[in-house]
Amino acid sequence: MDNNIIDEKQLDEEQSGVLSQISPFRIMLAAFIGLAVVVYMFISEFDAKEFGKIEWSSHVFIWIGMAMFFMCFRHFCYMVRLRIITDGFFSWKKAFELVMMWEFSSAVTPTSVGGAAVAMFAIAQEKLSAGKTAMIVLYTVVVDTFSFLSALFIFYMIYGAIMVQPGASNWSELMGTKWGIGFVTAYGLMLFYGGLFFYGVLINAKGVQKFLLFLCKIPFLKRFREKAIQMTDEMALASSELRKKNWSFHVGTYLSTMAAWASRFMVLNCLIIAFVAYSPNVEVQQYYQSFMGGEMGFGAFQQQVFIYARQQAMYVIMAVMPSPGGAGVAEYAFKTFHNDYIPTAETGIAVAGTLMVIMATLWRTFTYYVYLLVGAIVVPNWVNKIIKRNKAERLAAMQKGNITL
């Protein structure tokens, strides 16, 4: 069979795989799961009278505005990282589209899977070499994983078990909870695949291939053999590209990655400052300060660092959830993870239940639903444009006699 025909079939298969991952069904599924939990929270805890008692002051709107700023700044940091990794190959507009594609695909696929496959396909359409394409996606996986896990390890050394589970004062108490077990399991899995990618991309891709092929001898893993070969081949390509880079490339990539992660988590910090930490409701503010200032003995800055650390712990658990983008689980976990400084309806504090629902909804809107909404507009247009371009290129090649049927 002609090699050109093989290439065309491979392209069709890749395109079909990508379209299946960002299909309308997946979009609706992700939105339905998350919104179903939000609706349940509103039905069970929202109270119109309590809502009317919440003071929507300039302070609240300023900090909601800051939350929106960090949402946008996070996207900007990823755009900067993409331009650094590609040596400015992509324009700012193209970088925006590609980051949106990546974030959108992550939102509609299980968090444990992520949007790397879609990102690989999307970047490959931009006429970069196979090596550069592999390097962009795989190196960002390495940097994302280790910048996140290293920060989380440092935070755990500082704060201990209570950073992961409200009320847990030591390791044994933490491991006695489902969230604690989930945290340790998820951290271990992320460390394993992060280490695998680090070793394969930066040290020895062939060694990783031998290891994966050995694992693929296990009967139920045999079906992953071809994927293992493909992935390690891409690691080798990425590794050869990275050897050409100087130290400023790695520093720039790391700093932009850390800024993006910080921006992601600062969204909730801003909402807590808006509604809880400086709430005009005396009971709400006292509840917050009794834990932060009383039990923990934190000053204002330390309080915000602790909230940031708690979010990182929650995110690790979300990373192994099977639902699209952690939808449903994240909304439910919000209340569980933050109930020692954000009052819930069970505390008996007026407006507490309603306040929790509003904050959870705003938080997920800024960190998740906005990507579903904007992505549902941007991504289909991008996909249609790519499909039309590919068809036009095929037709032109056929007319020139470069493709034989």
Image (cartoon, rainbow, N blue to C red):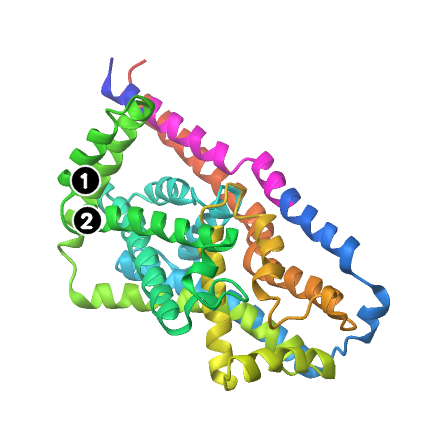
Q: Is residue 379 left or right of residue 191?
A: right
Residue 53 lies in the magenta stretch? no
- Quarter of the rendering occupied by the C terminus: top left
Residue 264 visible at all: no
Viewer-proximal residue among 132 and 159: 159
Q: Which residues are magenta?
A: 9-31
Return the x and y of residue 286 as percentages of the image width and height. 67, 82
Classify residue 355 as left or right of residue 120: right
Q: Amino acid at mark 1?
A: Val
- Determine the residue positioned at 64% across, 61% down: 360
Which residue has dot 1 on it?
A: 208
- Would you say the magenta stretch is mainly helix, strand or loop? helix
Q: Are marks 2 and 1 in contact (CB under 8 Å)?
A: yes
Q: Residues within 10 Å of mark 1 (few under 14, many from 20)?
A: many
Q: Position of residue 293 (x, y in %)?
A: 55, 84
Secondary structure, mark 1, is: helix
Residue 218, given in percent of the width and then of the height, sits at 27, 25
| In magenta stretch: residue 23 | yes
The x and y percentages for residue 280 are: 72, 84
